[in-house]
Image: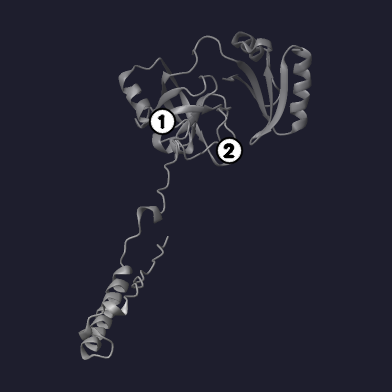
């Protein structure tokens, strides 16, 4: 923003009564003429000085643009307090298994925790840990690790326990190899790891919506008290069955007795 510069003007002198003018400065005298010339010279020099200085006035603080406010820390991002907590505590659970990563096809979609997925953030998806659990993921081949939050559900691939964001995959050395064995140390969770929770069985992915609808109708007949929905995702069509009460034991029983002709069935925690 450019500061607006106001030129100062000399005040108009008050008129002096003629009776108060000394005789040697009376109009028409040599002294009066010399005085007028000196006055004009001083006035010109003063105006030049004032105009020259006015271009170098620094803008007042009120005229400067306000500083941009700092963005708030996104939910799900590990903070300094989280890092201190992990340094001072032992993990409450440790899991071992294969981790993969997911990225472009899910970018800017809504994650299971309600946030918009950012593939470049350092987060991960898991099927059964409470949402927003704080975990450290360590690549068991390279020793690279990252502290992150569970913000999504997946992976929906048999034999895998974790789906890393692209940012987390790069941080842990999983990005280039695609799949790697990892250790997942759980340090904090908003819900109990072993008790309670809301559970469902998710089945898919089906290449065609017709097969998903056929399975949905079959499940509704088999489990009339359950809520069964079908929906389209980035990788195909899915069916989700939420048993009455959403208890884990009931969901596990449904999982044992469900054998889809296409796709796979997974136990998934909803909260």
Relative to 270, is 2 above or below?
below
* Residue 153, x across and y down, in percent: 56, 26
Of all residues, the one furthest to the front in this rendering is: 19
In what quadrant of the picture does the N terminus appear? Answer: bottom left
Foreground label between 1 and 2: 1
* Residue 163, x across and y down, in percent: 51, 30
- Residue nearest the observer in this picture, 6 or 232: 6
Q: CA distance from mark 1 to mark 2?
A: 21 Å
Q: Residue at x 32, y 25 (%)?
A: 84
Q: Which residue is mark 2?
A: 106
**Could you classify mark 1 by the number of other residues whose Cα lies within 10 Å: few (under 14), some (14-19), or many (20 or more)?**
some
Residue 7 in view (yes/no): yes
Q: Give SS at disc 1.
A: loop
Residue 163 in view (yes/no): no
In what quadrant of the picture does the C terminus appear? Answer: top right
Q: Residue at x 41, y 50 (%)?
A: 66
Callout 1 touching callout 2 (CB < 8 Å): no
Relative to 249, is 266 above or below?
below
Q: Residue at x 56, y 40 (%)?
A: 107
* Residue 58, x across and y down, in percent: 32, 61
Q: Which residue is mark 1?
A: 78
Q: Residue at x 32, y 73 (%)?
A: 51
Query: Where on the picture, by quarter, is residue 181?
Result: top left
- Residue nearest the observer in this picture, 129 or 53: 53
């Amino acid at each position: 923003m450019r500061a607006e510069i106001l030129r100062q003007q000399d005040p108009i002198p008050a008129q002096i009564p003629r009776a108060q003018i000394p005789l040697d400065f009376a109009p028409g005298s040599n002294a009066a003429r010399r005085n007028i010339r000196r006055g004009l010279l001083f006035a010109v020099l003063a105006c030049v000085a004032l105009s020259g200085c006015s271009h170098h006035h620094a803008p007042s603080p009120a005229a400067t643009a306000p500083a941009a406010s700092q963005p708030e820390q996104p939910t799900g991002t590990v903070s300094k307090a989280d890092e201190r907590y992990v340094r001072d505590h032992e993990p409450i659970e440790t899991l071992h298994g294969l981790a993969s990563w997911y990225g472009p096809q899910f970018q800017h979609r809504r994650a299971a925790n309600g946030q918009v997925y950012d593939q470049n953030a350092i987060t991960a998806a898991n099927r059964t840990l409470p949402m927003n659990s704080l975990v450290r993921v360590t690549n068991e081949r390279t020793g690279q690790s990252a502290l992150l939050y569970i913000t999504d559900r997946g992976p929906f691939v048999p034999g895998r326990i974790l789906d890393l964001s692209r940012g987390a995959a790069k941080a842990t050395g999983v990005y280039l190899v695609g799949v790697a064995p990892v250790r997942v140390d759980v340090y904090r969770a908003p819900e109990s790891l072993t008790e309670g929770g809301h559970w469902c069985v998710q089945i898919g992915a089906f290449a065609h919506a017709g097969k998903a609808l056929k399975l949905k109708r079959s499940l509704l007949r088999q489990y009339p008290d359950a809520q069964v929905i079908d929906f389209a995702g980035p990788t195909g069509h899915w069916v989700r069955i939420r048993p009455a009460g959403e208890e884990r034991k009931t969901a596990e029983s449904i999982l044992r007795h469900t054998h889809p002709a296409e796709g796979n069935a997974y136990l998934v925690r909803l909260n």
